[in-house]
């Protein structure tokens, strides 16, 4: 028992211990997977489990244990009506993404008889070749409730595709941001804390990565490594961490000279303990803000990749739908309009929320 | 040092300025009146927050209008009420006939424009003289104010000057159009101690040789003693006492004035604790109709909490706003006020 | 200041080296070796595999040790030999020379459009803070930042080309660059790319102007009797524009290139983005590598120039 406590103390608390244990278990399982047994867990699940563990240990648990603080910030945020609206929208979207697919049709079911149906309430002219007269006649096709948002040029139900796309976008949004924030935060804090040449080298490295235009680098990496969904998530995370790193480093730098850090050092705390127990919790609020504000960029990046055809072809991302829509602009305009609208609203919601959070966390703004 | 029988060029009557803040309405200037005569130096004295800066800004309507607003009073300058003047005509007065020197030259100078540009800006705008003539005038002014190598420094930027030199630049800016009235808002406060005296000398010289009418704002009684002809003691946005500098130092009437004078450390006399006025600066949001100094006043009477203060003219040109002097009887200076320290200061000048 | 410029140049050189090396490392890490890819695309064209492999090995030295490859890579880059584009059968350098102008005109016009409107709206918003126009402008800038710019492009095409027929749906490359018709063809693409940029600019300008409006030297300018127009135009703007200028230039790399890429693809403008897009699907990797590198180097040069320009523009830095 004593030894458990001692180890826990060294890494800054039970929570950290739990986290690192999970990591260790994953690592062992991974090694087993590679060299001994065959595929106990599919590879992408490793990433998911890791990211979920991080989310719980460093996201949910701290919020829960500091309930008063959380309620304080919650109240400040809710004074921003737009931010609240954004949060509600996101909540709805998450709900739809999780349970929606059980209620909608199969998004991949192709039915050429029902192709290019407009959404409910609209009618569209279609020219049909009439076998009996040998001429083209125009017929008015109305939208039906069986396909409330219409169908695409292959007869797939739009609503189902959009719901499925929501799943993709939200997954990418949250997970890729998590990756980016993880890399950026660890790098930033370590850089700020270590100082000296380590700081220099890490910052030069960050500068080098920042020099690549984000989208070009993303295209390059996906081109080189292949467009699978989990890889795209990783790729976006690996290219988008630079802003987070810069920000976290500057926040951590300003904290480093503060008295409570100096006191901890004076009391003999080890570097790891200081980093995990003192520095990281205190840079949490700007991290939360920048994470929320990064999600829209991530979602747009994935949509853009899918749009130009570098997305995961087996997923029904909104970007892919948009791509198909561009060629049907004259015959079936809704194929292009609908995914764009929902994409826009999602991004807007995250931007509102992020802005509200930023104001809520800024100690100088009075709300 | 008596008030010269010259003409009154600026007359302020019952000036009221308020600031509308989330916490409430701040009555920063609550009924100030005074007169400024040609060639005279009027000092506005008081603690920080007493409204002296707000009052001076109100004269030229330089109050930031979203939170602040001038809500009442008159500022009569050469026959016209500045508070009611149309904006274009007000702009003719600003910088041209009434100029103002601000407190901290570091922030009141524009960092990305040359010093010469900023000094000649007002001249070029208010009159029709050529750029070259304006430049020559500016350089002459800089020389007079003691800025060395004026020709080359004309093209330098504010950050290339020391604090004292920057303040001279702001004074040059104010003087560039030969204004009739110069308002100086604590021009020596943000400057090093060694430079303070030099800047003060500049103002003294302006008053004596140029016969400039000066409104000098300060919280330092020593400066008041050196430069003032008349003094307006302010407290809580209102006037506590007004009179000649002799009146104020030799026979102060208002308990606040006396308290201020007592605060001056007595360098020559016995080593006692530094005197101070108990209490803190007043809340200007819920300020009472009656005397605003009453909570801190050692001579407070029951009537002070209830009735608005009367203006008591205790001698010619010397008015005290205090219930101690009634509104009707002649001066009655109560005894035992211990005036020695400040009197010594006064007579040493 | 000269010392600063020299230090900055050295720093830029280091970053350039880092960028090129990082690209090389990424290439090496990729699971599909260049040889495999070439094989795939060449076989599709019916070439003899053995010959192709020999050609690739002799040119790209894929079986030689890494450091040698690196050396060759670096020397090729410096010498200006940026590879051969298989899909278009010309040296990559020539391909770039043919097409960069299209990207350049798009980005230039969009930046001008965005800058002019962004500054105008931003300044107006700031001086009339809390007015209706301010709220509307802020709201629109939120929308502009959130609007996916590729969707905006498609929507513009839908409304203005398909429904209204004012513009063609596809960019006509036969038009001479400096012609009015070319300008007309660029209207929709410029609006597409410029709107997102403008939204960002409006926010930056507004906040910078607001910051400066509160400063004391503005009060001094008013106290001199200057009209409000001059107070804002001369005193406030010159101070507000300095940080704006740097932010604008730094944004160029991260945001603009991505947006330009998509805009070119949508409208069929044959700029470098579109070329890269074609190359990706033709597995023409020298082109993709080169365009990525060019993007990074343009950003690098822009940052360098902006940094040095700033030291000259801000008198506080110019005269230390």
Image (cartoon, rainbow, N blue to C red):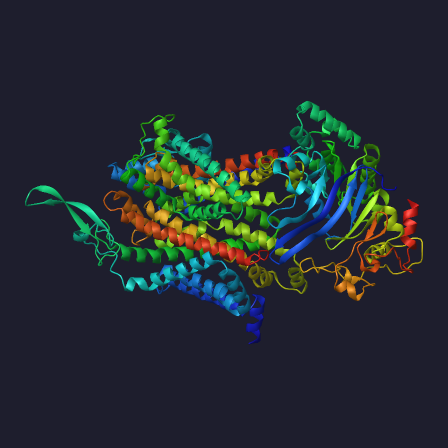
Looking at the rendered image, the quarter that the N terminus of chain C falls into is: top right
Q: Quadrant of residue C160?
A: top left
Q: Nearer the viewer, residue B261 or B264?
A: B261
Q: Nearer the viewer, residue B335 or A211?
A: B335
Residue B275 placement (x, y as % from top left): 85, 59
Residue B191 placement (x, y as % from top left): 77, 43
In this rendering, the answer to whether A15 lies above or below C26 is below
Q: Name the side, left or right, on which B7 lies relative to A325.
A: right
Identify which residue is drawn at 26% across, 36% down.
C47
Identify which residue is drawn at 56% across, 60% down.
A280
Identify which residue is drawn at 72% across, 25% down.
B136
Q: Nearer the viewer, residue A95 or A317?
A: A95
Please, which residue is most extreme toward the bottom here? A1
In this rendering, the answer to whether C105 lies above or below C215 is above
* Residue A212 in sight from this viewpoint: no
Q: Name the side, left or right, on which B159 lies relative to C162.
A: right
Residue C169 placement (x, y as % from top left): 29, 36
In this rendering, the answer to whether B214 lies above or below B271 is above
Q: Quadrant of residue C105?
A: top left
Please, which residue is most extreme toward the left here? A132
* Residue A316 in sight from this viewpoint: yes
Q: How many marks?
A: 0
Residue B324 placement (x, y as % from top left): 83, 60
In this rendering, the answer to whether B345 lies above or below C191 is below
Please, which residue is most extreme toward the right here? B269
Q: Name the side, left or right, on which B29 lies relative to A18.
A: right
Looking at the rendered image, the quarter that the C terminus of chain C falls into is: top right
């Amino acid at each position: 028992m004593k030894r458990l406590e001692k180890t826990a103390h060294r890494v800054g608390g039970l929570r950290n211990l739990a986290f690192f244990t999970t990591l260790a278990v994953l690592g062992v399982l991974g090694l087993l997977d590679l060299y001994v047994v065959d595929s106990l867990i599919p590879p992408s699940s490793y990433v998911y489990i890791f990211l979920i563990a991080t989310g719980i240990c460093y996201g949910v648990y701290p919020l829960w244990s500091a309930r008063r603080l959380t309620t304080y910030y919650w109240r400040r945020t809710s004074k921003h009506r737009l931010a609240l609206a954004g949060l509600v929208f996101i909540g709805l979207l998450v709900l739809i993404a999780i349970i929606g697919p059980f209620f909608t049709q199969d998004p991949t079911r192709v039915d050429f008889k029902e192709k290019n149906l407009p959404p409910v309430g609209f009618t569209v002219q279609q020219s049909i070749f009439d076998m009996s007269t040998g001429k083209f006649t125009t017929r008015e096709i109305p939208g039906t409730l069986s396909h409330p948002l219409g169908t695409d040029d292959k007869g797939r139900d739009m609503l189902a595709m959009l719901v499925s796309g929501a799943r993709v976008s939200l997954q990418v949004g949250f997970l890729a941001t998590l990756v980016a924030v993880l890399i950026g935060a660890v790098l930033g804090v370590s850089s700020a804390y270590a100082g000296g040449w380590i700081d220099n080298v890490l910052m030069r490295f960050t500068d080098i990565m920042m020099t690549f235009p984000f989208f070009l680098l993303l295209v390059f990496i996906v081109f080189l490594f292949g467009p699978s969904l989990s890889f795209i998530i990783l790729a976006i995370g690996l290219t988008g961490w630079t802003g987070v790193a810069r920000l976290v480093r500057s926040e951590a730098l300003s904290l480093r000279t503060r008295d409570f850090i100096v006191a901890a050092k004076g009391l003999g705390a080890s570097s790891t303990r200081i980093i995990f127990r003192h520095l990281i919790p205190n840079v949490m609020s700007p991290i939360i803000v920048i994470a929320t504000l990064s999600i829209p960029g991530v979602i747009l990046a994935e949509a853009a990749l899918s749009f130009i055809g570098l997305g995961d072809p087996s997923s029904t991302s909104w970007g892919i739908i948009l791509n198909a829509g561009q060629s049907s602009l004259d015959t079936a305009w809704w194929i292009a309009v609908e995914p764009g609208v929902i994409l826009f609203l999602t991004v807007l919601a995250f931007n509102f929320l992020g802005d509200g959070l930023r104001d809520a966390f800024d100690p100088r703004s009075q709300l | 040092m008596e008030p010269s029988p010259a003409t009154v060029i600026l007359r302020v009557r019952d000036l009221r300025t308020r600031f509308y803040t989330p916490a409430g309405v701040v009555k920063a200037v609550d009924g100030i009146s005074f007169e400024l005569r040609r060639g005279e130096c009027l000092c506005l004295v008081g603690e920080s927050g007493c409204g002296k800066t707000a009052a001076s800004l109100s004269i030229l309507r330089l109050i930031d209008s979203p939170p602040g607003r001038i809500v009442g009073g008159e500022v009569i300058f050469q026959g016209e009420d500045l508070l009611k003047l149309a904006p274009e005509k007000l702009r003719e007065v600003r910088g041209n006939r009434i100029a103002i020197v601000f407190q901290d030259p570091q922030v009141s100078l524009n960092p990305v424009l040359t010093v010469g540009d900023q000094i000649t800006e007002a001249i070029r705008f208010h009159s029709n003289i050529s750029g070259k003539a304006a430049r020559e005038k500016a350089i002459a002014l800089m020389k007079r104010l003691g800025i060395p190598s004026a020709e080359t420094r004309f093209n330098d930027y504010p950050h290339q000057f020391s604090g004292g030199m920057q303040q001279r630049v702001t004074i040059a800016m104010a003087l560039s159009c030969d204004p009739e009235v110069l308002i100086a808002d604590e021009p020596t406060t943000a400057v090093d101690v060694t430079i303070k005296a030099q800047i003060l000398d500049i103002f003294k010289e302006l008053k004596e040789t140029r016969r400039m009418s000066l409104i000098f704002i300060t919280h330092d009684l020593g400066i008041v003693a050196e430069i003032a002809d008349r003094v307006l003691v302010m407290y809580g946005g209102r006037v506590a006492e007004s009179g000649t500098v002799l009146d104020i130092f030799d026979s102060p009437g208002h308990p606040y004035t006396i308290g201020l004078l007592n605060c001056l450390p007595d360098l020559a006399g016995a080593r006692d604790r530094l005197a101070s006025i108990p209490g803190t600066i007043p809340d200007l949001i819920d300020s009472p109709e009656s005397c605003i100094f009453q909570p801190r006043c050692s001579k407070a009477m029951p009537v002070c909490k209830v009735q608005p203060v009367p203006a008591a003219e205790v001698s010619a040109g010397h008015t005290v706003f205090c219930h101690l002097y009634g509104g009707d009887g002649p001066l009655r200076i109560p005894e035992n006020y211990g005036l020695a320290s400040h009197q010594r200061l006064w007579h040493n000048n | 200041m000269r010392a600063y410029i020299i230090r900055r140049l050295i720093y830029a050189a280091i970053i350039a080296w880092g960028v090129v090396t990082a690209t090389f490392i990424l290439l090496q890490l990729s699971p599909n070796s260049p040889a495999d890819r070439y094989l795939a695309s060449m076989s599709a064209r019916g070439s003899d595999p053995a010959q192709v492999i020999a050609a690739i090995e002799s040119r790209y030295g894929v079986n030689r040790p890494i450091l040698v490859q690196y050396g060759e890579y670096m020397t090729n880059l410096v010498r200006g030999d940026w590879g051969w584009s298989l899909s278009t059968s010309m040296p990559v350098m020539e391909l770039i020379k043919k097409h960069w102008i299209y990207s350049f005109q798009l980005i230039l016009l969009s930046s001008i459009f965005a800058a002019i409107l962004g500054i105008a709206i931003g300044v107006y918003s700031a001086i009339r803070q809390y007015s209706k126009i301010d709220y509307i402008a802020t709201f629109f800038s939120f929308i502009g930042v959130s609007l996916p710019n590729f969707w905006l492009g498609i929507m513009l095409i839908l409304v203005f080309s398909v429904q209204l027929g004012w513009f063609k749906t596809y960019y006509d490359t036969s038009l001479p660059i400096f012609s009015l018709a070319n300008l007309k063809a660029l209207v929709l693409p410029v609006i597409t790319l410029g709107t997102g940029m403008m939204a960002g600019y409006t926010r930056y300008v507004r906040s910078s102007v607001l910051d400066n409006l509160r400063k004391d030297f503005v009060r001094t300018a008013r106290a001199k009797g200057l009209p409000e127009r001059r107070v804002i135009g001369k005193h406030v703007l010159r101070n507000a524009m300095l940080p704006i200028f740097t932010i604008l230039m730094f944004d160029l790399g991260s945001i603009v290139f991505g947006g330009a890429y998509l805009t070119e693809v949508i409208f069929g403008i044959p700029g470098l983005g579109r070329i890269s897009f074609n190359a990706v699907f033709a597995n023409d990797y020298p082109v993709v590598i080169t365009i990525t590198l060019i993007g990074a180097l343009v950003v690098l040069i822009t940052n360098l120039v902006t940094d040095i320009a700033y030291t000259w523009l801000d008198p506080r830095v110019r005269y230390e």
